[in-house]
Image (spheres, rainbow, N blue to C red):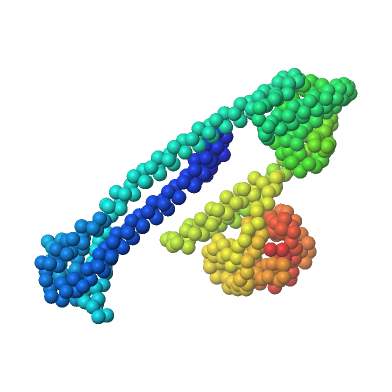
Amino acid sequence: MKAFAERLRKASIGLKLSLTFVFVIALCSLPMSLLTINYLSNKLKQHVMNTIEESVQSQKDELIELILMENYWRAFNKIEALSQIPGVKEVVLVDANNRVIASSKPEEKVVGRYFSSSTDYLKIPIESYSYTIGYLYYQIKREYIEGIVSPLRFITLAFTFFFTLVGVLLGVFVSLRINERLRQVREMIEEFKRGGMPTKKDFWERDELTELADFVHKSLSDLKGIFSNLEFARNFYESLFNTLQEIVLILDEAGTIYFCNKAVENYGFSVESLLGRKVGVLLGGPRERREVRESIRQKGTYTGVVKLRNKKGEESYALAVLVPWVDAFIFTLKDITELKRSEELVKRMEVFSLLGEMSAYLAHELKNAILPLKLLSEVSEWNEDDIKVVRASIERVDKIVSSFLQFARPVEEKKREFSSWQLVEDVLKIYEPAIKKKDIDLVLDVMDFKLYTNKTALEIILSNLLKNAIEAVDEKGRIEVSLRKDGEKTILMVKDNGHGIPKKHIKKVFDPFFSTKRDSTGLGLSTVARYVQMLEGKLSVFSEEGKGSTFLVEVKA
């Protein structure tokens, strides 16, 4: 259906007009023809019914006598005569008990046998002194009615086809005339594009297309004067901009260059080669292209250091400034390559340090995700729940890798709706083997409610807090997990009765890489803090050495 609608949308005016004429003719003529034919069929049927009923009424006394006396031969002759009425197919005379007395088809309806009528038969009761003593059944011959109606149906279809053909031809004629006038209007525009001023077109018709042609001619005349003024202004400002050492570009709303000064020649580009191209052709990094493109889309300003690349692919650095101007943008680029090279030497050392931290973070998160797989590897046989845990762990690894790739370019997952129990159960499936191994008493206090937020972020928060609690308690320890709704806030609490956190370390537990455990990277709780901050939430910790710790997370969800 969509494909048909798309073809119809792209169809020519002639085809649309022809289809419209055909549709109107068919809509008007076919239903009327069908109604007329149907009416005539009903009138013919009624005529046959009236004729046989009148015959029965005129011979009523004789039929009564035949039924009462059971004179089968005379009854057969009478019924045979009635069956000769035009349009009558078969006639059967029966008594009050539906036993056949006479039939126009005695070989099928045997005298004396019970007659079982169908819906094809019509019946006329034969009464004597207000008592029904018999019935006369008859069938109407459809071939008789069809023979009269068929010629009329053929004539109707012929007329419909004729007028449809006329409609198609009329549509084609009107279409050709419209196309011819539109072609002349297009010629006016093409001549204007070539730099000339077209002459006004005069058409015989005085309709909307003639008004369109007059409007186009007047508009082109006005544009001619406007373009002359613009050409003068363009030459003036172009001379002014070409004296500047900075690159000056004017972009349209799509980021396409439609003016640049001669400073681009310092980068191996000619002015003509850049006109009509996207501004990204000058920018060397995908980040810069994305940020500039986003600023243009939002009709905002942009200031930053960007990479420039010349025609040979060599890169340099420039201070970029983008400002909106009417329906366009002014984009300036000032070369700061020498200053940037000095900064790069310092930043290179910072990058190596950052790479080390990121690698440690990735290793820490992958270790958490693979832990269930490691524990399940010690189980001899896996059940369906174990397989689900494996799948969940693999999915978690995938999410961690994705998060790592987005570290320098964080992208928040879209909010979605999910249940509180779904969140808790998804995380518990991962750590269930570790909980069973240490025989931990896990107490759940989870309200059943719906959340609408970043589910992955909450999973990472709960997962890291639960892992931290499992590592903190001894065998047969106790962990409490609470998830409840308080107005617009969702409150998550993870409490354990482990060794607790020394008072001097409380303020450092959320610092990256801080840990009192030998094998820990110290990124678990810092990851929790980062995701709580991303959700614009609040994170608190309460701990007493030797008695355990309580972590409280409050977010809007």
Above/below status of 258 relative to 95: above
Instruction: Point out residue 82 in the picture as x, y percentages from the top left corner.
Output: 21, 62
Residue 526 location in percent, x, y?
Answer: 71, 56
Number of numbered callouts drawn:
0
Q: Nearer the viewer, residue 464 or 304?
A: 304
Q: Quadrant of residue 538?
A: bottom right
Question: Which residue corresponds to the image point at 54% horizontal and 65% vertical from the top-left?
Answer: 432
Residue 128 lies in what quarter of the image?
bottom left
Q: Is residue 444 visible?
A: yes
Identify which residue is drawn at 67% across, 34% down.
207
Q: Quadrant of the C terminus?
A: bottom right
For the point 37% across and 54% down, which residue is it? 40
Left or right: where 539 falls relative to 11 = right
Out of 492 and 120, give the one closest to the viewer.
120
Would you say residue 552 is visible in this rendering? no
Indicate left or right for 303 with 45 as reference: right
Residue 33 screen position, x and y as percent:
42, 48
Near-viewer residue (89 or 475): 89
